[in-house]
Amino acid sequence: MIILDGKITSQKIIDSLKIEISNLNFTPILDIIIVGNDPSSQKYVAMKQEKAQSIGIGGEIHQLSQDSTTEDILSLIQNLNQDQKVNAFMVQLPLPPQIDTQKVLSSINPQKDADGLSPFNLGLLFQKKSTGIASATALGIILLLEEYQIDISGKNTVIIGRSPEVSIPLFALLMAKNATVTICHTKTQNLKEICQKADILISSIGKPNFFGKDFIKPNAIIIDVGFVADPTTGKTTGDFDYDQVAPISSFITPVPGGVGPMTITSLLYNTVQIAKQSILL
Amino acid sequence: MIILDGKITSQKIIDSLKIEISNLNFTPILDIIIVGNDPSSQKYVAMKQEKAQSIGIGGEIHQLSQDSTTEDILSLIQNLNQDQKVNAFMVQLPLPPQIDTQKVLSSINPQKDADGLSPFNLGLLFQKKSTGIASATALGIILLLEEYQIDISGKNTVIIGRSPEVSIPLFALLMAKNATVTICHTKTQNLKEICQKADILISSIGKPNFFGKDFIKPNAIIIDVGFVADPTTGKTTGDFDYDQVAPISSFITPVPGGVGPMTITSLLYNTVQIAKQSILL
């Protein structure tokens, strides 16, 4: 069993992004919109800005109040869409319940969409020659698989969860690499049987230790996007019961230290691609 | 075995669309762009216009020459995007080889996209509360399943083919109805085994009689999007060997007369929805 190490892989990519940025003759700008004061979102945004600055990406955080309206956010997005100094920006999710998240994400200029969450970019991912910007979490998983030179072509791949932010773009990226992909969800009737046939098994349902070894085909590749506190131990835990599953898998992402670190890295990766593209325009 | 009759279902929907249009206080306009003189495209576009006119939809055909450039088409699309008299329009595919089809489809105003082929609409289909316009062929299949009150929720559904025009939007629509969906393609390694587990089996690969009864789970629902001339008989034929497969299936679409008629109907269905929406704007 080999651990898919998101920390080491992230650092390698971050190092090469830093070199790419130093070769640009300008500072790429990534702005971040955050609405409200959710502590984990605040912490996450601070981490993103810190990491961005550490490799030479500038930009500011736009803090909106918890009681903002959808229109408030759309108005700010319109400004950023038009501001030629801003190469890319993102909106930290989740947004407060009164906000129409889909409308917000739909209003982002697809060419500045650092987090790859606009529906236009999602649609582009499915085109034959995709030019879409991929969702950062989905891209992070692909970059991790690439780092370990895992051959995806023709593999039975099962994704549990159907979010348009992670599962669907991941589906598009894996299929573009010729995987045979199945998406399962709460209404799937024979989940265990389907998982048992998976060469690659990916979950983002956020249920601690949900998948035991009875779900796993020996030598499967396990990608764990789950990241929640286990209610009994309080420890950050993935969807897979790591102690049970790791010994029979061929590759596995730990939680924490697997997919998590790759997400911020991919956000910065997207930002650098957008900035490089802006030179060509 | 029950035949999913696309002709009868189309006629029912067409009849109700005609009533909906007669209740509007204006004539919905659907324009069609066609490039070059491919006989089957010409015939197909003529059928679309004739059917549209028969229920009170107006609009003109824009004929561009075979040697048109991508820019020629984009320029026409810009005009139609802005022309307030045109509610909806579509571009007949396939386009000549020198044309960047993805760029063309990406430039269509998503709110006028009668054929539902812009990447933005594809991306919207995957959102939780989808407001996207669905690809006409994919929507036609859903309308056919609905007409026969086929329960999709939790069903193992296998789609063979991965085109962004048919398979991917169909995947989105079926998943929104809680099906568990797998997409297979040329690189899938164990196609027969996967098909044998499908409660619903859908193919759009265009290989006459490719699937015999050995691919079929007894009582499966068979949706055949294939529509090509059999090289030996010259007869229009689907991807499934109908004589072998029909007796063991629970529902099946014939070719011709199954999915085919539903595609034009869905184009007109989309046009009417867009026209009704325009009253609210």
Image (tube, coloured by chain):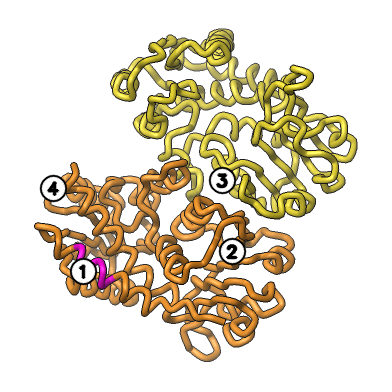
Chain colours: A orange, B yellow
Q: Residue at left 59%, top 35%?
A: B138
Residue matched to label 1: A18
What secondary structure characterizes most of the magenta part? helix
C-alpha distance separating marks 2 and 1: 34 Å
Residue matched to label 3: B172
Judged left or right of residue A12, residue A167 is right
- Pointers 3 and 1 in contact (CB under 8 A)? no
**Do the residues marked 3 and 2 share a common chain?**
no
Span of residues in magenta: A14-20
Residue matched to label 4: A84
- Which numbered tag is attached to residue A279? none
Residue farthest right in this picture: B247
**Do the residues marked 3 and 4 share a common chain?**
no
Q: Which amino acid lies under the numbered mark 3 shown in the image of this protein?
A: Ala
**Do the residues marked 2 and 4 share a common chain?**
yes
Give the chain letter at badge 3. Answer: B
Give the chain letter at badge 4. Answer: A
C-alpha distance separating marks 3 and 4: 35 Å
Q: Which amino acid lies under the numbered mark 1 shown in the image of this protein?
A: Lys
- Pointers 2 and 1 in contact (CB under 8 A)? no
Q: Position of residue A136 (x, y in %)?
A: 37, 61
Q: Is residue A18 magenta?
A: yes
How many residues crowd around disc 4 within 10 Å: few (fewer than 14), some, or many (20 or more)?
few
Residue matched to label 2: A160
